Structures are given as C-alpha cells and as structure tokens.
Image (spheres, rainbow, N blue to C red):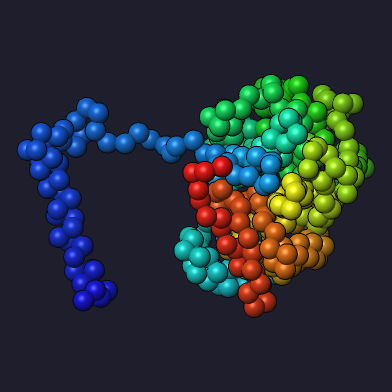
Amino acid sequence: MISRRTILASAPAAAAAAGMAPALAQNAGAPAAGAAGAGSAAGQAPGFYRYKVGDIEITAVHDGVAMRPVEGLVRNAELGDVKKALTEAFLPDTALPITFTALVIRSGGKTVLIDTGNGDNGAPTSGHFMRNFRAAGFDPAQVDTVLISHFHGDHIGGLRLKDGTAPFAKAEIMVPETEWAFWMDDAKMSAAPEGMKGGFQNVRRVFGPVAKDVKQFQAGKELAPGITAVSAPGHTPGHTAFRIASGDKQLMMVADITNHPALFVRNPAWAAVFDMDAEVARDTRVKILDMAAADRIQLAFYHAPFPATGHVLKDGSGFRFVPVQWSSAV
C-alpha cells in the first residue's frame, strides 16, 4: 500500500542506491560519474516553441527570467494572502520568478516580432532572446516589422543594446500612438516621480536615434496580415494587446494585462506594483479575461510560465489559467 510513510521511508534507500550507481555502472562497463564525457551540460535546450493559429505560425521565444521580491508586489492585498496564492501554485513565497516571452509571427509572407525582450539591459538571468531566436531559425535582418505593446524596458530593451547596436535595423518599428505621446513628452518626464525618470530616459535611448522613422498606430488597426491592435490601457497609458486571426481561429497576445497568472489571473482585482493606473488596469484585465473565458479564446501572456500560452476559465471570483498541451507537431 502506498502511503506518505512508505514514500518517506524509502528515501534513504533510494539515496543509498543512487550512491552505488557509479560503481555499478563502472562494473557494467559504463564510465563512472565524473569521468570524461559523463554528466550533463549546463543550461537548457533552446527556449522556443512553435504553434499554429489557422495558417499563421507563432513562435514563442523565451528571454529568461528575473526574480522579484514578493513583498510589495501586490498593492491591494495582504502579504499573507499573496504568499498563500503562491504556495497553492507551488511557487516560492519570497521571490517570484517573472519570465519574459516574445512572439515571432509568420503571416502573409511577413516575419513580425511582438516585443523584443530585455536585450542586454535586464537582469543577468534574462537577455536570452537573441540566442533562442536564432536557434529557432530566425535572422534579425529578415524581420519585417517589430510591434511594441508598451514601453517598459523588458519589452523594448532588445531594440537597442547598451553599445547602441540595433539588432532589427532593417525592420519597420510600430508603436502605440498613446504610448509614444506619453513617454516622449518632456513635460511628463519632468513631472514624473524620481523612480520613473529612468523609464523615460530609456525610452529616449531606445527610440531617439530612429524617432523620425517610428510609425505610430491606433487601436483597431490591422498592422500586419491577421494582426490587429487592441486597446488595453492601465498597465501603461497606451498598453496594447494584439489579436491574431486566421480563418475561424484566433489568439490574443495580451502582453502585461497580468503579471504571473497564479496571482493576477486567479485574483484579477489585485493590483500589480507595475500597473501605472491600477483601476483602469483591473477593468482591462477583467474585460479581456471575461471575453477569453466566454469565447474560449487562446491567450499568449508575456509573463506566464513558458511557452506562456493557454486558456482561462471562470473560477469563482477569478479565473484559472489552463496552459496549452505541449506538442512536437506544428
């Protein structure tokens, strides 16, 4: 009979067996642990995942992770409640791993990138986008269009590296009109709290050299074959989601309407410290999650666990995130 007691009791025996494994392997003609060629290489396989929306090919590209202290992460919830939600999701309750996932879309003969990752401007555990992008078979020189959801550094950092290099120099850069108006306003930068000034300065660092060539778009416009901008304000003034549609299939790339789903899908009224207008962000979040649950629309998040896509179901006062079934087929 399997019980917690029998499982725990078996642990010492399992550890002892593991300790004997090198000797047994050596006796069988296999190299001992620590011998040349044994063991595993550091790191993971390339972080990309392909799937289809009708005739459109989507490739999720992982940029890495950053750890964020849990204390202060949610503005309007008790720390104990936040820790409980994380524990229930089998996540650490002191620092939350926040992942970054951009999308590469092949549609109508065009290669379109939605957001760019941190580049070399983020946490040391981030900045893997370009390696994974190339591993997925893409060349930055062949990107036709880069669509930006909003101007936070983890979404635009890959447009311009610290040395000034622009990896997507041949691509058309398209940004939300409202977002551009806010972050490029000198008066708003002067009036901003000290903690936000760095964000304004980074926007100018990234876009300044190409400002005259950047194209601004409005919500409701089709920006590339099958890709339409959807207004999703609150996280930032011009924060934008993207509807990707082919035939009767659709996906909505919702960018940062939530941070980690274990917190903000499950508890959509919670306000993340990153949201500039918490009330508007909450209304946007609930509206989109409600629609996605009712119409069974697949969502792609920027900060969900990789490959950061799945569905949501209504669950009490909140929602439940259901990740996609991983498949090797495209």
> What is the x, y in percent for residue 120?
61, 31
Determine the residue positioned at 82% across, 47% down: 229
Determine the residue positioned at 88% across, 48% down: 219
**Extreme residue in the front direction:** 247
Q: Quadrant of the C terminus?
A: top right
- Total label count? 0
Q: Is 37 above or below relative to 21?
A: above
Determine the residue positioned at 69% across, 42% down: 55
Task: State left or right for residue 207 relative to residue 186.
Answer: left
**In this orientation, which residue lies closer to the viewer: 242 or 161?**
242
Task: State left or right for residue 49 relative to residue 204.
Answer: left
> What is the x, y in percent for residue 20?
12, 47
> What is the x, y in percent for residue 5?
23, 74
Q: Quadrant of residue 155?
A: top right
Determine the residue positioned at 72% across, 36% down: 107
**In this orientation, which residue lies closer to the viewer: 246 or 220?**
246
> What is the x, y in percent for residue 149?
77, 44
Q: Quadrant of residue 33?
A: top left
**Extreme residue in the left direction:** 27
Q: Is 192 above or below relative to 291?
A: above
Residue 68 visible within the image:
no
Residue 210 visible within the image:
yes
Q: Quadrant of the N terminus?
A: bottom left
Q: Is 107 above or below relative to 229?
A: above
